[in-house]
Image (spheres, coloured by chain):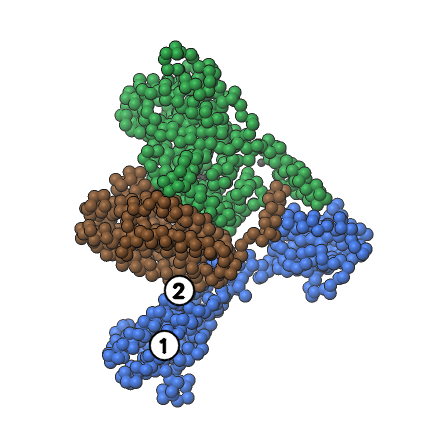
Chain colours: A green, B blue, C brown
């Protein structure tokens, strides 16, 4: 691969001269393009949604080895809804899974809403009109530990690492927005589509599960640069979020990082699934906005304007920090968020996670402050090695002064719906019956 | 050429832009004359050590330069037949440059350079570039690790807190001493005296430098013309003399009152004293030497003979300011940090050899000159070790 | 390096040249920081003394006496919170609230002042509080010891003034801190005193250059003082529910403005 720096080196002098000659901005633009196009394109699920590129007709296939909504790029809107499940035997659980499968099939593909006798309530909320368009919708179904723990016939099938989310030292968990038997991650281009999907599913499954909590979020859309590559969207602390995510177009990497394989000691039914960690993390934004710029950068470990690592401030967010060359943390403090989260040595490769967060903005706290934060969602093949380990490394980080995890839960994302004759969770149901 | 074409010389606006662009990204900034104001016509007299560079049509002379880190002055002579610019480059970054040197003219450029290998341009862009190697120097090594001034605020204030607490302690103990003298309670007086002395030893590295107070608080009879009968024989040792030699509190009351007043003044003076970062190690090293040369050899407490206990307190008092620098020193130079820690341990080992027991404390007048010399030598070695701290921190 | 970086840098350079950058930290901060540590040490000595009396009362089952001692004991802690918070484990065990625990008040992990407050006011009893009281006293002593051997980081001290206001703004103005006893106004007093102490200590360093800034800050502290004065009751304050809505708004605005203004103090003193 061509080293973009070499390219820079040779073009730099000329550009600088042109700049002096008064060509200023044009010269700069030209060089930027040159440099960026020399890099291989790298896709991350957290790549920002691209402005004006989204269409109501966008659709993500809902069938496959794995569920949709994990390694697909984030659209602008996302939501996690958590439910208590009523099923008390395999048949009832199968019925729920079949309902979900059916609704997912309709909602993510689209079609006309059936018209009923006007004397009856309508079949559909009608939010999207008579014709439902997919609008990039994905609905990802995952199961909480309590679903297994509370059902002796299911308990032996619980994935090895699935557990009730524990309290980490900086947490102030609100029981009303924690845990659940089943989570839906619903993502789409527009908020109406996610809400429509949620209302549709609630209506269809009202006898099977009860909504416990939900949190909506969104990500700003970004206009891509001339090279077609969009910069990462910013979170509510004003920093680019997603820069260092693993490449979601790299199938082998996703198999290693995200998807549970046959050799991980998980129950056979679980192969093709993933662990989902959801955290509702409040940001103290007023206070953050009153924190010195330099300190903000040291806390995160990246520059605020571009997202470049601190040891190459002039670089881009996609440059990789060299911690070995900065053993004392002079450039990137040892306790910077990104440095604690990933030391980028051999050992830390085992702890890579796929982050797919959304920003949320809820309302106002009792104290008259903004209730905003990050709906943090991440996926990994091993919950202990992934989220739990990374969060433990982050415990005590300086960022904690500005954030407060208040809710969320751990879930197991079911394997995909293989084909039109399959239904979600069929492998689990088969195993439950076999057991 | 009476006035260079503003466009080609880089008129003020584009000039500013360049400097803004480059300057912001460059850590190594020009030592002097960052601007082309250093006129190309008037060649300043060369500074000693100026490095001459001759730029010809095809290359520089020499093509390979080596200078020590720190400030260097280059004198560039344009021996080609076109106007040239001369640049020092770090990768693609311009570290320093002189533009528009007309044929036949010379221009000077001063740069403060960090160790590393730089490119130098030699006339036409198509000409091969020369190499400038900047080697590490003692200066650059210290510069590299030099903590910012800000890093000393914490240690200096912590030391001031220490001085405030200890001088407060000393004032309180002297108050107790005065009360005991009033009550003719010899035992209480002796123990209050010892407590006051310990606190005094803790702060002596600084208080010892406040001459007027020092002469009132701590004069030793040996250095007074009339010895114990001298009217200037006041302060601590006068009281020691009364309590231990004369075995009586007679006449001590006014001495104690004066000592209390002096102690209060000392507390205020310590509060007001302004320290520089160099003072932390500087005062400690100076005090270690003073102890080695004077009190350790000849003894201070001629009547109580309890120097060993006081020396131990004095060493603690030396270690306080040094320990505050240890985190910075450890980062800058682990060797120096270790040498200091070792030197403190060595002094304490020497003291350990002299310490008796509570039941039978060592009488310092019984300590042999050789043993005294060994302790003094350890203190001098400690001073030497502490002396390495400031240079290691890039101070002075 | 990339040109895109250079463009960013040029913006920075222009800011630099327009003098928007604050001064460098100077050694003039040494004395204020030293004074502050002495202030904190005195508060801690008082905290240990008061906590001893408070926990003794709890252990002796003297509910009324313990209730009386609760708010005044906390005063010293609230004044030095920015430093106390540097030890997050102790801050959590001394001063965390029920919301920090998933099962709230029922959570067996819920410790410290507010656990005892809950028992005293909600249950009107000291039952089961003896071990909590012992732990609290031990934690407070541990805090005193740790702070004694701490070299105060200047930016934490100067930043502390703002931190205290942030605390009030984020989680106190609502009355959620002392939700069982409603003694919040005492805590406010401690927070404001602590913040003002810091401002007063660094005042000489900025008096000339930042006269207007200091005037605004003083005026806001003044507003707080006059508002709080209305609710004075003996040595302390009436309960938080007596605070009128209007006064709560006045306080909230003053606190937000103080938080906003004091957040620049570090930068003004060159401590980014
Ligand atoms: C509100 C809370 C959080 C905020 C504001 C935040 C923000 C950021 C930002 C700005 C980055 C740098 C850009 C990037 O690489 O994406 C980052 C990186 C990262 N964060 Fe977070 N984050 C938060 C919570 C978490 C949590 C809870 C975890 C996991 C336990 C986490 C794990 C990571 C990881 C693994 C990286 C990439 C580090 C690297 O590979 O260099 N973050 N975060
Ligand atoms: Cu590449």
Quick check: marks 1 and 2 in contact, CB under 8 Å?
Answer: no
Is B361 rendered above or below residue A196? below
SS at badge 1: helix
Chain containing mark 2: B
For label 1, count other residues whose C-alpha is less than 10 Å away and answer few (under 14), some (14-19) or many (20+). some
Q: Quadrant of the N terminus of chain B?
A: bottom right
Residue furthest top as drawn: A117
Residue furthest left as drawn: C61
Is A120 rendered above or below residue A273? above
Numbered badge on residue A434: none
**Residue pointed to by mark 2:** B161
Place of residue C193 in the rendered image (x, y in percent of width and height, measured from the top left):
37, 56
In the displayed structure, does residue C34 sit left or right of residue B70? left
Is B116 rendered above or below residue B195? above
**Residue pointed to by mark 1:** B261
Residue B106: quarter of image: bottom right
Q: Residue at x 58, y 61 (%)?
A: B139
For label 2, count other residues whose C-alpha is less than 10 Å away and answer few (under 14), some (14-19) or many (20+). many
In front of the other: label 1 or label 2? 1
Camera-nearest residue between B276 and C216? C216
């Amino acid at each position: 691969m061509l080293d973009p720096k070499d390219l820079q080196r040779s073009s730099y002098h000329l550009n600088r001269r042109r700049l002096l000659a008064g060509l200023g901005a044009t010269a700069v633009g030209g060089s930027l393009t040159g440099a960026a196009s020399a890099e291989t394109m790298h896709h991350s699920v957290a790549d920002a949604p691209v402005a004006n590129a989204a269409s109501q007709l966008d659709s993500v296939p809902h069938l496959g080895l794995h569920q949709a909504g994990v390694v697909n790029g984030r659209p602008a809107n996302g939501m996690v809804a958590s439910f208590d499940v009523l099923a008390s035997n395999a048949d009832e659980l199968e019925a729920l899974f079949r309902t979900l499968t059916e609704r997912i099939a309709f909602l993510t593909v689209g079609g006309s809403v059936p018209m009923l006798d006007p004397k009856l309530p309508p079949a559909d909320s009608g939010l999207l009109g008579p014709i439902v368009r997919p609008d990039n919708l994905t609905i990802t179904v995952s199961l909480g530990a309590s679903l297994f723990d509370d059902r002796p016939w299911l308990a032996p099938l619980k994935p090895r690492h699935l557990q009730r989310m524990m309290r980490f030292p900086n947490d102030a968990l609100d029981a009303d927005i924690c845990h659940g038997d089943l989570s839906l991650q619903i993502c789409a281009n527009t908020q109406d589509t996610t809400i429509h999907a949620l209302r549709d599913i609630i209506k269809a499954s009202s006898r099977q599960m009860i909504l416990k909590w939900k949190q909506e979020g969104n990500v700003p859309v970004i206009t891509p640069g001339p090279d077609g590559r969009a910069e990462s969207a910013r979170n509510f602390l004003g920093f680019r979020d997603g820069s260092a995510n693993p490449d979601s177009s790299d199938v082998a990497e996703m198999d290693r990082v995200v998807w549970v394989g046959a050799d991980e000691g998980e129950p056979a039914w679980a192969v093709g699934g993933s662990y989902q960690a959801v955290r509702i993390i409040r940001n103290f934004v007023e206070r953050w906005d009153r924190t010195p710029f330099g300190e903000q950068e040291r806390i995160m470990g990246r520059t605020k304007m571009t997202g470049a690592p601190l040891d190459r401030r002039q670089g881009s967010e996609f440059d990789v920090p060299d911690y070995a060359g900065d053993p004392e943390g002079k450039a990137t403090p040892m306790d910077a968020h990104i440095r604690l989260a990933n030391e980028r040595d051999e050992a830390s490769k085992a702890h890579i996670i796929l982050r797919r967060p959304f920003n949320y903005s809820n309302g106002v706290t009792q104290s008259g402050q903004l209730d905003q934060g990050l709906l943090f969602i991440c996926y990994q093949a091993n919950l202990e090695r992934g989220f739990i380990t990374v969060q433990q490394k982050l415990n005590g980080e300086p960022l904690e002064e500005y954030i407060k995890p208040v809710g969320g839960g751990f879930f197991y994302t079911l394997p995909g719906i293989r084909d039109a004759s399959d239904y979600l969770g069929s492998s689990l149901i088969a195993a439950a019956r076999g057991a | 050429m009476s006035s260079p074409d503003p466009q080609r010389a880089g008129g003020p606006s584009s000039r500013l832009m360049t400097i803004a662009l480059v300057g912001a990204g460059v850590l190594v900034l020009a030592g002097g004359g960052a601007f082309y104001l250093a006129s190309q016509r008037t060649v300043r007299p060369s500074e000693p050590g100026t490095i001459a560079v001759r730029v010809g049509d095809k290359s520089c002379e020499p093509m390979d330069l080596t200078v020590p880190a720190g400030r260097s002055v280059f004198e560039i002579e344009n021996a080609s037949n076109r106007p040239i610019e001369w640049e020092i480059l770090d990768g693609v970054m311009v570290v320093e440059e002189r533009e528009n040197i007309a044929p036949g003219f010379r221009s000077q450029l001063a740069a403060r350079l960090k160790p590393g290998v730089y490119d130098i341009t030699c006339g036409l862009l198509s000409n091969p570039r020369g190499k400038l190697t900047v080697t590490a120097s003692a200066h650059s090594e210290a510069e590299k690790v030099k903590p910012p001034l800000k890093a000393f605020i914490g240690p200096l204030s912590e030391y001031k807190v220490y001085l405030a607490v200890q001088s407060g302690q000393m004032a309180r103990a002297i108050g107790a001493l005065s009360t005991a003298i009033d009550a003719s309670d010899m035992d209480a007086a002796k123990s209050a005296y010892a407590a006051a002395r310990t606190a005094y030893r803790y702060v002596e590295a600084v208080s010892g430098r406040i001459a007027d107070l020092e002469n009132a608080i701590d004069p030793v009879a040996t250095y007074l013309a009339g010895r114990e009968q001298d009217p200037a024989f006041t302060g601590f040792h006068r009281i020691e003399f009364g309590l231990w030699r004369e075995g009586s509190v007679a006449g001590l009351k006014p001495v104690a009152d004066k000592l209390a007043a002096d102690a209060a003044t000392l507390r205020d003076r310590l509060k007001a004293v302004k320290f520089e970062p160099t003072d932390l190690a500087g005062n400690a090293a100076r005090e270690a030497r003073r102890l080695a040369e004077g009190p350790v050899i000849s003894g201070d407490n001629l009547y109580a003979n309890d120097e060993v206990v006081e020396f131990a307190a004095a060493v603690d008092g030396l270690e306080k300011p040094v320990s505050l620098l240890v985190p910075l020193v450890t980062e800058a130079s682990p060797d120096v940090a270790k040498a200091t820690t070792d030197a403190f341990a060595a002094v304490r080992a020497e003291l350990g050899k002299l310490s008796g027991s509570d039941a039978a404390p060592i009488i310092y007048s019984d300590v042999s000159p050789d043993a005294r010399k060994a302790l003094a030598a350890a203190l001098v070695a400690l001073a030497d070790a502490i002396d390495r701290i400031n240079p290691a921190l890039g101070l002075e | 390096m990339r040109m895109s970086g250079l463009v960013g840098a040029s913006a920075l350079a222009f800011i630099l040249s327009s003098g928007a950058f604050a001064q460098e930290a100077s050694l003039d901060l040494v004395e204020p920081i030293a004074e502050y540590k002495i202030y904190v040490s005195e508060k801690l000595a008082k905290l240990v003394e008061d906590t001893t009396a408070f926990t003794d009362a709890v252990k002796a089952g003297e509910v009324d006496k313990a209730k009386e001692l609760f708010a005044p004991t906390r005063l010293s802690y609230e004044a030095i919170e920015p430093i106390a918070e540097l030890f997050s484990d102790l801050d959590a065990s001394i001063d965390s609230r029920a919301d920090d625990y998933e099962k709230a008040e029922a959570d067996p992990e819920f410790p410290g002042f507010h656990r005892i407050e809950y028992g005293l006011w909600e249950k009107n009893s000291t039952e089961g509080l003896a071990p909590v009281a012992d732990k609290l006293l031990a934690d407070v002593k541990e805090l005193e010891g740790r702070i004694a051997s701490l070299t105060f980081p200047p930016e934490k001290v100067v930043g502390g003034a703002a931190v205290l206001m942030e605390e009030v703004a984020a989680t106190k103005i609502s009355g959620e801190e002392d939700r069982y006893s409603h003694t919040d106004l005492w805590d406010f007093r401690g927070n404001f005193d602590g913040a003002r102490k810091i401002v007063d200590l660094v005042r000489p360093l900025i008096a000339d250059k930042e006269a207007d800034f200091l005037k605004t800050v003083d005026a806001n502290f003044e507003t707080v003082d006059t508002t709080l004065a209305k609710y004075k009751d003996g040595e302390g304050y009436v309960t938080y529910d007596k605070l009128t809505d209007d006064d709560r708004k006045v306080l909230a605005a003053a606190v937000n403005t103080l938080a906003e203004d004091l957040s620049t103090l570090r930068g003004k003193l060159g401590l980014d």
